[in-house]
Image: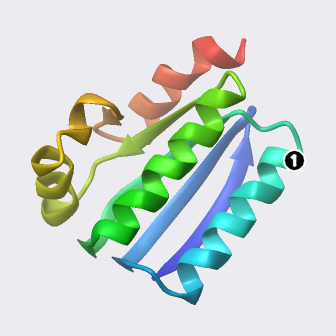
Amino acid sequence: MTSTSSLQDGVLLVRLTGDLIGSPDTEQLVASINQHLGESVTNCAVDLSEIRYINSTGIGVLVSLLTKFRSRGGEMVLINPADHPKKMLALTKLNNIFIVAANETAAREQLMPAVQ
């Protein structure tokens, strides 16, 4: 898995590609997001459109990140999950917990009231 992140208007945008499974890449992702949380970032959008496969460890990472943002009074939105992640979210019923947006613009609209 590879990840890139950018910060714009108080929203951290994280783009993921590949497989979201327990790996050193996943640990680097969590460390990077923790660093941003230390910089008072409380809102995040995670683009899952290029994630081919997600396992239980990957689901656990998403839940952990969501908890971190919400515990700081913020929110995390998932952007356009690809087929397998979408199925896993539905299977685990986490699609009722996560906010899912169709694209980056919709994700920012979900998060902007929390930023203001």
Q: Is residue 35 above or below residue 78?
A: below
Q: Secondary structure at mark 1?
A: helix
Q: Is residue 15 left or right of residue 49?
A: right
Q: Position of residue 23 (x, y in %)?
A: 50, 86
Q: Residue at x 56, y 73 (%)?
A: 3
Amino acid at circle 1: Gly
Q: Toward which corner of the image does residue 18 lie, by quadrant?
A: bottom left
Q: Where is mark 1, residue-wise?
A: 38
Q: Position of residue 39 (x, y in %)?
A: 89, 45
Q: Residue at x 58, y 88 (%)?
A: 24
Q: Residue at x 23, y 37 (%)?
A: 95
Q: Residue at x 75, y 33 (%)?
A: 10
The outermost residue toward the bottom is: 24
Colour scheme of the picture: rainbow
Q: Toward which corner of the image does residue 51 lie, by quadrant?
A: bottom left
Q: Is residue 85 left or right of residue 87?
A: right
Q: Position of residue 82 (x, y in %)?
A: 21, 60
Q: Is residue 92 left or right of residue 113?
A: left
Q: Nearer the viewer, residue 97 or 10?
A: 97
